Structure formats: structure tokens, C-alpha cells
Image (tube, rainbow, N blue to C red):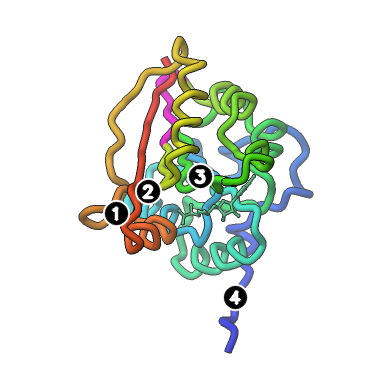
Amino acid sequence: MAKILNDYPSVALKPEDLGGKIDFSHIFGRKCPVHIEIGSGKAAFLLNQAMAQPEVNFLGIEWARKYYRYAVDRIGRWSLKNVRIIRTDAAHFITNFVPDNSVECFHIYFPDPWPKKRHHKRRFIVPVNLEQLLRCLIHTGSVRIATDHTEYFEQIRKVLAVCSNQLEKIEFFPTAGANVGEWVGTNFERKYLKEQRHVYTIAVRKV
Ligand SMILES: C[S@@+](CC[C@H](N)C(=O)[O-])C[C@H]1O[C@@H](n2cnc3c(N)ncnc32)[C@H](O)[C@@H]1O
């Protein structure tokens, strides 16, 4: 039987309600550091990290309707007040709605690798999107990335290297929901570790 997923309007931001650049303190009802997760999947990271860091406001961006609905239901049932999620394309949303110098950290865990060469243009971590992340980050804000995909990881390192004058490498520490041997404790990480895949991580800070 299909699981019944509830809607929680207080959790879900609607793209159609956004006017222009958003005011995070209005959305969360308080002024606190903002972390954004790109491609939240079933929201395992958001839930665990938001519980561990109640002083941080977390926004998840998820494109796939089935994951988004699952995430809304979970965040709502956990009654977390410091998490919101929006169903939209992350590149479009960040470019058009996230203000300059407003985000403390971007989390990007297991971004779709689009392995076929003709699909590489669909990858999220490309120079034009990194430029936008840099624009939105506060001074000393960070970007944290994990992937199992060797070739995409190489591309990610190259894309970050292009902006090396604006970034410095920092340690990638495991997230709150990670078990021993895990980095981020998300559904995709657990699936890939079961398949004995290597997980690559990288974290950089805006200087
Ligand atoms: C491989 S899954 C990883 C999910 C989760 N981060 C995890 O580790 O379990 C990639 C997720 O990113 C979402 N996604 C891909 N491109 C996106 C985009 N442009 N904007 C928002 N979400 C996106 C997909 O729908 C999918 O849920």
C-alpha cells in the first residue's frame, strides 16, 4: 500500500509565492545563519543536521516531486521549526531568489552525475553555478560536496580550482547523521557504501 504523505504548508516554500530575492529572516521568522542543501532527496541530511544545529536555518532544494513530497512529510512529522524545503530547479532558484552574502554553507551530497558525455551539461557543479554560490555565500561561508562518481569528482575539483583565488580548501568533517564510516549519512551514501563504492568529499571556504 502506498504511504500516505501529508502536506505541511509551514515547511514547504512555494516557488509561485516568491517575488524576488528572498528574505530568509522573514521565511524562518528569525535571523540566523542559513544553510542550503541542493538536491535533498528524502531529507536525511536536513533532518539530522537541523536537529543537531537548532541555531541554524536550513533550506532544502529538491526537484523531484516524489522526493520533495516525502521530505515535506518527514520534516513536518518531526516538527522541525528550522527547516524549509522548496520544489524547484536549484540553479534557477539560487540565481534568481537567493540574495548576495546571505548563505553560510551550501551542502551538495551526491549530485546527479549525468554519466553520459552528452548529458554533462546537466551537471549542477559547473562554473556558472559556482559563481552563483560564491555570490550568495557570506565571507568565510563554505561549500561541501560528496560524490561517489570519480570522473564528476575530477570535474568538481577543476571547477573549484578555477576560483581558487576566492576559495580555500578546508577539512570535510562528517555530518550529524553520519554513522561510523560515513561522511553524510544520506540515503544515497548508504546505498553506495553497501555497493562498496568509494565516496569522495571536498569542502572549500570563501576567502
Ligand atoms: C543522487 S540524488 C541524492 C539525494 C540526497 N542528497 C542523498 O544523498 O541521498 C540527487 C538529488 O538531486 C536532485 N536534483 C538534481 N538536480 C537538481 C536540481 N537542478 N535542482 C534541485 N534538485 C536537483 C534529484 O532530484 C535527486 O533527488
Q: Amino acid at mark 2?
A: Pro
Q: Which mark is residue 37?
A: 3
Q: Nearer the viewer, mark 2 or mark 1?
A: 1
Give the residue at the far front of this rendering.
Answer: 117
Provide the secondary structure element on which disc 4 rests. Answer: loop
Kind of element beneath mark 2: loop
Q: Tell me which label, 4 or 1, sits earlier in the chain.
A: 4
Quadrant in the picture for the C terminus:
top left
Return the disc, 2 or 1, that comes first in the chain's sequence.
Answer: 2
Residue 164 location, x and y as percent?
45, 14
Quadrant hosting residue 3: bottom right
Choose mark 3 or mark 2, whichever is in front: 3
Rendering quarter of residue 193: bottom left
Do the CB atoms of the residues marked 1 and 3 lie less than 8 Å apart?
no
Instruction: Please tell me which residue is depicted at 60% across the width and 38% down the height of the picture.
Output: 124
Residues rendered magenta in the picture: 139-144
Q: Is residue 141 magenta?
A: yes
**Which residue is under mark 1?**
178
| Residue at mark 4 | 5
C-alpha separation, residue under disc 4 versus residue under disc 1? 25 Å
- Whether disc 3's CB lies below 8 Å from ligand 1 is answered yes
